Amino acid sequence: MNMERSPDGRSYVGESQVNFFRLQTLYRALHLHRETGMIPTRGMSRRRMLDMAEQYTGTRYKGSDKGSEAALRDLLGLIARVSQENGDL
């Protein structure tokens, strides 16, 4: 994966990097909803976030608190695995 770094921040370059950023953003949005009940953006719902998580993990999640917790665990594991495989993250 290519990631450009500068003193001002980082840029995700390429399809795999954009998908990795999307994965991180999905994790943070679902975590925000789980902890505070806030929906990160209009048009988003817990069900929609869980459906997006399913695209990454291949697991169907129930729309309950336990389903959200399972999705968060799986997403975090996936983030860690991708980061480790691509040591530059």
Image (cartoon, rainbow, N blue to C red):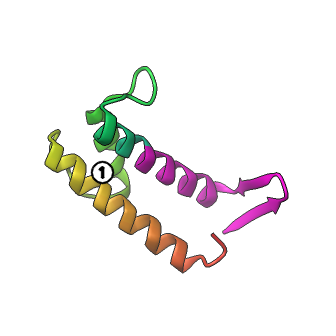
Is 2 positioned to the left or the right of 47 in the image?
Answer: right
Residue located 27% across and 54% down the image = 71
Please determine whether, in this image, residue 37 is positioned above or below residue 23: above
Query: Is residue 9 shown left or right of residue 28?
Result: right
Is 17 left or right of 41, judged from the image as shown?
right
Furthest toward the front, the residue is: 36
Q: Position of residue 20 (x, y in %)?
A: 54, 57
11 relative to 62 in the view: left or right: right
Q: Quadrant of residue 87?
A: bottom right
Viewer-proximal residue among 60 and 27: 27
Image quadrant where one finds the N terminus: bottom right
Q: Is residue 11 magenta?
A: yes
Query: Hey, which quadrant is residue 77 in on the image?
Result: bottom left
Q: Nearer the viewer, residue 82 or 32?
A: 32
Give the answer, above or below, for where 28 lies relative to 82. above
Q: Which residue does the numbered mark 1 point to in the structure image?
A: 54
Image: magenta residue range: 1-28
Q: Name the outermost residue toward the top.
A: 42
Asked which quadrant contains residue 4, the reply is: bottom right
- Residue at 14% of width from left, 40% of height from top? 64
Can you give x and y, in whole percent of width and height, for residue 38 in the image? 36, 29
* Crowd rating for badge 1 (residues with CA inside 10 Å; few <14, some 14–19, many 20+): some
Q: Is residue 1 above or below residue 52?
A: below
Q: Position of residue 2 (x, y in %)?
A: 72, 66
The location of residue 36, given as percent across then percent down, is 33, 35
Three-letter amino acid code at disc 1?
Answer: Glu
| Residue at x 26%, y 35% (from the top left corner) | 47
Q: Residue at (85%, 58%) from the top-left corner? A: 7
Quadrant of the image containing the C terminus: bottom right
